[in-house]
Amino acid sequence: MINAGVLLSGELTVITEKEETLVLKAGDPIVEVVGKRHYGKNTGPDPATILVFYAGSPETPISIKE
C-alpha cells in the first residue's frame, strides 16, 4: 500500500533488494518503496520516530511478507 510520511526523529537507513541505500535524517520526507522487497533499520543512536499516512482501502494489505 502506498504511504508517505516524515521522519520526526532519529536516523533511518532503507535498503532495497538491489542494495540501493537511502539514509534519512530527522525532518526528511519518506515515500515508501512499493512493489519491491526492502527493509529499514535504525542507524542512529536515538529511536527513529516516523509519522506515516497510508492511502488504500481496508481490503488492501499494508505489506506483503515474502
Image (cartoon, rainbow, N blue to C red):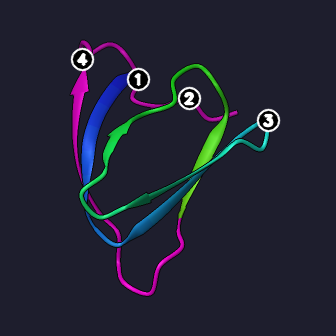
Residue placed under numbered mark 2 in the picture: 64
The answer to whether mark 2 and mark 1 are in CB contact below 8 A is yes
Determine if the magenta segment contains residue 40: no
Residue placed under numbered mark 1 in the picture: 61
Q: CA distance from mark 2 to mark 4?
A: 15 Å
Helix, strand or loop at disc 2?
A: loop
Q: Is residue 13 above or below residue 30?
A: below
Q: Which label is found at residue 58? A: 4
Q: Is residue 63 above or below residue 11?
A: above
Image position of 26 (left or right of 25) = left
**In the image, residue 13 lies at what x, y percent?**
55, 59
Q: Nearer the viewer, residue 3 or 9?
A: 9
| Pointer 3 local density, CA inside 10 Å: few below 14, some 14–19, many at least 20 | few
**In the image, residue 53 lies at what x, y percent?**
20, 34
Determine if the magenta segment contains residue 54: yes
| Pointer 4 local density, CA inside 10 Å: few below 14, some 14–19, many at least 20 | few
Amino acid under disc 3: Lys
Comes first in the chain, label 3 or label 4: 3
Residue placed under numbered mark 3 in the picture: 18
Comes first in the chain, label 2 or label 4: 4
The answer to whether mark 3 and mark 2 are in CB contact below 8 A is no
Which residue is found at the position 35% from the left and 69% from the top? 48
> Which quadrant of the view contains residue 64?
top right
Q: Which residues are magenta?
A: 42-66
Amino acid under disc 1: Pro
**In the image, residue 30 lies at what x, y percent?**
35, 41
Comes first in the chain, label 1 or label 3: 3
